[in-house]
Image: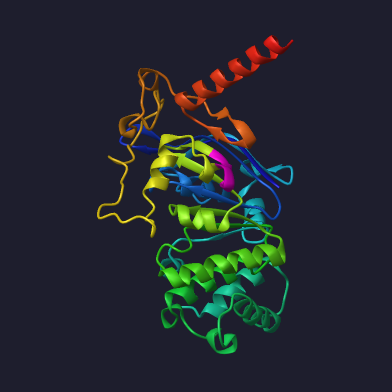
Amino acid sequence: MLTVTGLKTYYYSGGRALPAVDGVDLELRPGEIVGIVGESGCGKSTVVRTLMGLLDPVAARREAGQAFFHGRDLFSLKEKELCRVRGRQISMIFQNPLSALDPVYTVGDQIMEMILLHEKLPRRQARQRAVELLREVNIPSPELRVDQYPHELSGGMQQRVMIAIALACRPEILIADEPTTALDVTIQAQILELLRQLRDRLGIAVILITHNMGVVAALCDRMMVMYGGVVVEEGSCRRVFAAPRHPYTRGLLAAIPSAAEDKEVLYTIPGQVPALEAPVQRCRFFGRCGCRIDRCGEKEPPLVQLEEGQRCRCWLAAGEEDQTAEREEAGTVADA
């Protein structure tokens, strides 16, 4: 459904080129939920904002890459053509609903705006569709809520309104940019269950942006771990959680609190995501990695293919695969 290859997006500040996204590939299949996970500043949101054409042209620029959606390169579309795709075929749920929703319009008007923009319907039918959408995202008394303003709703309801707006034209792809960050745990679970139900019922594909590994484990089929603008590990959630190969992925998993362990101090990855400059000459996780070797500081590792579709950007993982291949080859020759 969606294939992204070699995506590079740089921010420019003070004459410096900062590689926010520096060569990312992404595949999305119908009905699939793919999670992109990592700390703030790793480039997760920049990937999807580049796809949607929502970057500030003064501060950011796509340097390379293609994004094919049903055979059409999104980056080659003119603005009017891209506007027909946004909202109708590819929709996005933004991170903070209170800032994304317009405070001077009712939630019904904001849902209707999306419907009237892409479909030729009279306002009465658009209003009825808005009520149905509010009911679909499990908002109680939708006939009353449709005439309320965003500030009259709770945080969970505001997020559901954002989902209703995104679903207004029945898109094929739904991008959710950290949709549960500002919500309490109970409401988070409800929103995640709602996304799963929508996927099952409507067959839409979902790209979920998050820094919460628990959310990825609960909802996603596949996951991509990003760090420093690149994918450092990817694969099925089952495989990555069972056998993480990159030190950064292992660090993220180790930082998850566990009810089975009695710890007074939780594990944290030392340091913070650095502001890298292009071109990058070494492993981007070098300064924070406790497993680094001399080669890590000399050259950036490639994203190598491991077993069961898992891929990892680490010299240690690449070395293990090379050694395994050599052992298997030697064993085959010996058998012969």
Q: Position of residue 98 (x, y in %)?
A: 42, 70
Q: From this view, report whether residue 268 is shown above or below residue 282.
A: below
Of residues 103 and 244, which is closer to you in this image? Answer: 244
Q: Residue at x 47, y 56 (%)?
A: 214
Q: Residue at x 68, y 84 (%)?
A: 124
Q: Position of residue 304 (x, y in %)?
A: 56, 27
Q: Quadrant of residue 299?
A: top left
Of residues 318 and 151, which is closer to you in this image? Answer: 318
Q: Residue at x 59, y 16 (%)?
A: 327
**Residue 238 is inside the magenta segment:** yes
Of residues 308 and 120, which is closer to you in this image? Answer: 308
Q: Position of residue 189 (x, y in %)?
A: 50, 68
Horizontal side of 238 relative to 283 (left or right) equals: right
Q: Residue furthest front?
A: 335
Is there any visible trace of residue 102 in the rendered image? no
Q: Which residues are magenta?
A: 234-239
Q: Which quadrant holds the C terminus?
A: top right
Is there any visible trace of residue 178 in the rendered image? yes
**Residue 46 is inside the magenta segment:** no
Of residues 156 and 96, which is closer to you in this image? Answer: 156
